[in-house]
Amino acid sequence: NAEPFQVAVREDNCIIVSLEASDVVSSSSVYVVKIAGESKNYFFQFEEFNSTLPAPVVFNAKYHGLYYIVTLLVVNSNMVSKSARSVTVLTKPLPVSNVSIYDYKPSPETGVLFEIQYPEKYNVFTRVNISYWEGKDYRTMLYKDFFKGKTVFNHWLPGICYSNITFQLVSEATFNKSTLVEYSGVQHEPKQHRTVPYPPRNISVQIIPLSRNTWEEHSGNFAEESFLGPQEIIRKEKASHASNSSPTETPAANTSAAWLDSPSNGTEDGTTPQPSWWSNEAESPEAEEEFVSAVSSAYGAGDGSTGPGRATAEPPPFLPVQMVLTWLPPKPPTAFDGFHIHIEREENSTEFLTVSEDTHKFVAELKEPGKYKLSVTTFSSSGSCQVRGSQSAKTLSFYISPTGEWIEELTEKPQHVTVTVLSSTTALTSWTASHESSANSTIVSVLSLTCQKQKESQRLEKHYCTQVNSSSSLIENLVPGAQYQVVVYLRKGPLVGPPSDPVTFSIVPTGIKDLTLYPLGPTAVVLSWNRPFLGVFRKYVVEMFYFNPSTMTSEWTTYYEIAATVSLTASVRIANLLPAWYYNFRVTMVTWGEPELSCCDSSTISFITAPVAPKITSVEYYNHLLYVTWTYGGDGPDLSHSRMLHWMVVAEGKKKIKKSVSITV
């Protein structure tokens, strides 16, 4: 039961084998260490010894994370070896050198992409140990689904700060029903990452008109005062109306009081002046009737006097309206610390507010008409990770008219959009909308898909090369042969709804005109034609129809394709025709569209080529008869499908003799 020989792995990946006293059988024996695990086995002999045990055997293992079997062999005087003991050891894998963490784009709220870098040569591991702090809870897990150093984690919690993220390569080996496990060290910089929180739900807005009496009650008929302050941010304080006192600074909970106008007497209060269209209202306790001391730009700056003899200010041309914005918290389990409210007016003036996580309602007064856009996002800031906001679940748009009318956002898109081509230059658009739709007009957007496919110098149309918007359902100035895309929007006032599904339509080209044929002998012709001035196309296709004696068939075949140019005239030379043969030629215009359109099959011209001259090979006169022999076209072609009718033999002496001879002679 004595301790066997000792095997240990040092930090430098060397295996140290030590011989113990219990391993010594006889002083005359030789002790050998066998190390297996790599592609070949290694043998090391302990030095000879008497009373003192020999020095340990040191083996420099090449592989990190690989298991080695170390066996002690005892060789007696008869050179017979005997395996005494075996020990299995596992070397430690090399550590991860670099870590990158990215959002998993399909689901940044719960997913991340891990990318790790580590030495690949002679480094063996089976799994990766991932350790991190999930908020205040420590987590660790073994993961094996890494492909080329990358894997996707898709079960984190949204909005949580994950800190001190480390990776360790893990090697595992099972030998004799026992499992060995070795972890690499941690040499990379610990990482941290915050998942994106989910956005708030059920965002809605209401606009409540304020009557003149209500506004005057809020303003107290004081030109230098207005009822301001969002209920979740700015608490109202009693303001002194004495002429020699300065306005009271208004504190804010989560943001600076950027929504207050500058005081009328110019005293600096350390706040940012709000836009002239903005006026926040707070719900104060019923016992309070004080007003925040600030100037309403809707009324204009006063001269600072508050005496009873002061004239009442002119009523504002636009009565403010009350905006009530509500939402619900994001779906659980989302960790969040508040909400960001983004308000934009006329695309050139914006406000950004921050409210606490238990706030689900925001009330403000809008003091100017115009088009507004609102969005509410969730943000998470607790922990050491960077602050992250949610994606915008929904952007609300509405319009306040100068008369105070509230026009809600249009959410419906036109359905069943169709385009009917009326002529080669006009088309009519139609669509359907629900009976509940509040839209009172439409926008028809037209864009040429053909124009983008042509070089600018070769463009035959220019009107719809950029998107053209119109309120009319009739589309004019179209070009034959072009392909267009139409999108329809519903509109009410300045608000525009979402686009319809795009509809593509094409105008059939008008085809060529004045097709003319010029013969160039028995085997060649020239085709020439003109195109209309108004038209767009991709190419000309020249085809011919004839009887092919090699295939014994008659069909239309493409002879040539000519790219479109701005020239109004085009021509092509057709060679290698058969003499005395019937041909039909056709030229069509093919468009850029998908599918292609072509026109027109009626642009044809027929022609019979001239025969070649026969060659007389012999003339003999015998017994008052003249014998004439000739050849035609080389090796006696098959003339059964030729359009040649007969031979004409002409003999001139004292008299001129003409004789028609059958084509078969």
Image: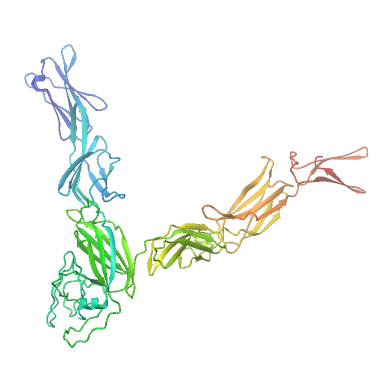
Q: Would you say 91 lies left or right of 642 here?
A: left
Foreground of the two, 305 or 10: 305
Instruction: Residue lying at the far bottom in this picture: please name it.
Output: 309
Q: Is residue 28 above or below residue 40?
A: above
Q: Residue furthest left?
A: 51
Residue at 31 percent of width and 61 percent of height: 395
Which x, y percent locates residue 620?
A: 87, 39
**Nearest the camera: 306 or 27?**
306
Residue 239 found in image quarter = bottom left
Q: Position of residue 479 (x, y in %)?
A: 54, 62
**Quarter of the view holding residue 284:** bottom left
User: How far across and how far down the image is residue 73, in percent?
Assistant: 17, 19
Q: Is 652 located above or below residue 337 in the figure?
A: above
Residue 346 visible within the image? no
Would residue 598 be seen by someone viewing this image from the given angle? yes
Q: Quadrant of the C terminus?
A: top right
Residue that sits furthest to the front in the current view: 435
In x, y percent, where is residue 539? 57, 55
Kindly identify the residue that appears in the image at 41 percent across and 61 percent down. Answer: 434
| Residue at the top extreme, as displayed | 78
